[in-house]
Amino acid sequence: MPSRSVTPGRTTVAPEVLLDIVRLETQKVSGVHALAPIPGMFNRLLRRGKEGVHLSVEGEVVDVDIYVILDHDVNIRQVSREIQKAVARALERLVGLTVGRVNVHIEDIHYPEAAEDTS
């Protein structure tokens, strides 16, 4: 009797887990100040998303939209690419999904208040 290399059964991953992975990986990237709310009430009611992240899963392919607020002193293009790489790598490594697109939307730039303004 030949031994099986794969145990029968199925593994499912809740969409909330995928959202959390994307949020955590995005926040780890240097230059990301915070996740931004997804624009538009219509989007929040009809799309699956959590603050700053919307994802769409079709079969084994996931597309991600990430809405961020960046620090004022960073290269926007470089930080965006780092977010894309980190998120794609995490989804492929942790969940085994194929990543279609990782779209990064810069919603704002954070400028810290000057110390002189408080006096």
Image (spheres, rainbow, N blue to C red):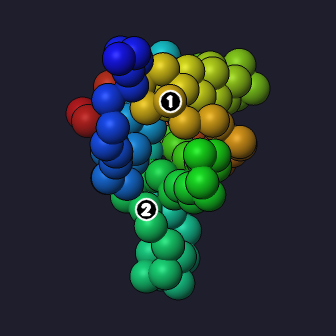
Q: Which of the pair 25/34 is nearer the observer? A: 25
The residue tagged 2 is 49
Secondary structure under tag 1 reads: loop
Q: Position of residue 103 (x, y in %)?
A: 68, 44
Task: Pick whichever of labels 2 and 1 is earlier in the sequence.
Answer: 2
Q: Which of the pair 86/69 is nearer the observer? A: 86
Residue 36 can be seen in this image: no
- Which part of the image, by quadrant, shows the N terminus? top left
What is the three-letter code of the residue carrying label 1? Gly
Q: Determine the CA span between mark 2 and mark 1.
A: 20 Å
The residue tagged 1 is 96
- Badge 2 crowding class, 10 Å Cα cut-off, few under 14, some 14 to 19, many 20 or more, is many
Q: Which of the pair 6/53 is nearer the observer? A: 6
Residue 92 can be seen in this image: yes
Residue at point 24%, 33% (across, down): 119
Secondary structure under tag 2 reads: strand
